[in-house]
Image: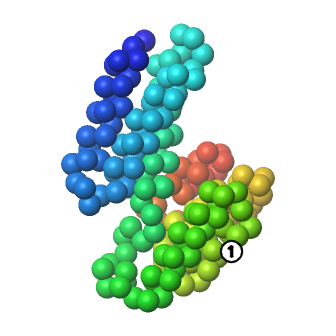
Amino acid sequence: MPSVKSAALLALAALVPGCANSENNKWLGAGIGAGAGLLAGRALAPKGKGTAGAIIGAVVGGVAGYAVAGGFGGKASEARKAEPEFQEASGEFDAGQAAKKQGDDAAALDHYKKATSLAPEQPEPYNNAGMIYLGQGDRAKAEEMFRKALAADPDFEPAKVNLRKMGVAA
């Protein structure tokens, strides 16, 4: 079983790939999330199960960090990002995240809906809306949103992970 010192070193190692390119916020977020998840999983695991807790925490934290840090429009072209409609969609997405953080799921869903109407090719607002629906126990609506995220971007890993967590094939 790794010690707290070795867990801290593993957390630091998780940051290295993310720090290699300061422009790549998703990987930095994944590294930070993995490091935090590793330490939290190790600390919260039952006695004697620290290694499994650390691994699970690192994986969950890494996926969450990747999704959250990526923000809106990670794969959008620079030309698309410059469009006023896209910028408005990005603002709506950010407002949705702020509303969610404040515990206002209804407002968050409204902002995510506006973001998807302005930039339907972006998977992030669909995925975040799916997370809210899943938290509310509406599995059908959550699955619908995760699938819309994948329709927008078939390689969007957070939506695939969320579907797998639900026990549904991506």
- Horizontally, residue 74 falls left or right of residue 136, namely left
User: Relative to residue 120, is residue 130 depicted above or below?
Assistant: above
User: Of all residues shown, which one is farthest toward the left?
Assistant: 20
Please count the marks in the image. Answer: 1
The furthest residue to the bottom: 84
The quadrant the N terminus occupies is top left
Residue at 26 percent across and 40 percent down: it is 16
Q: Label 1 amino acid?
A: Asp
Give residue 12's position: percent from left, percent from top.
31, 33
* Residue 15 seen in the figure: yes
In the displayed orientation, state which residue is furthest to the right.
Answer: 137
Is 14 on the left or on the right of 147, as rendered? left
Judging by the rendered image, the residue that carries numbered circle 1 is 110
The residue at 57%/20% (across/down) is: 45
Question: Which image quarter holds the C terminus?
Answer: bottom right
**The quarter of the displayed image where residue 72 is located:** bottom left
CA neighbours of label 1 inside 10 A, class few (<14), some (14 to 19), many (20+): some
Residue 144, compared with residue 8, is above or below; it is: below
Q: Tell me the SS state at disc 1.
A: helix
Q: Position of residue 10 (x, y in %)?
A: 33, 28
Q: Residue furthest front?
A: 102
Which residue is more in the foreground, 129 or 157? 129
* Residue closer to the observer: 155 or 112: 112
Quick check: can you spot residue 151? Answer: no
Q: Position of residue 114 (x, y in %)?
A: 62, 80
Name which residue lies at 46% across and 28% down: 39
Measured as percent of width and height from the top left, residue 106 is found at: 74, 67
Is 96 rendered above or below residue 42?
below
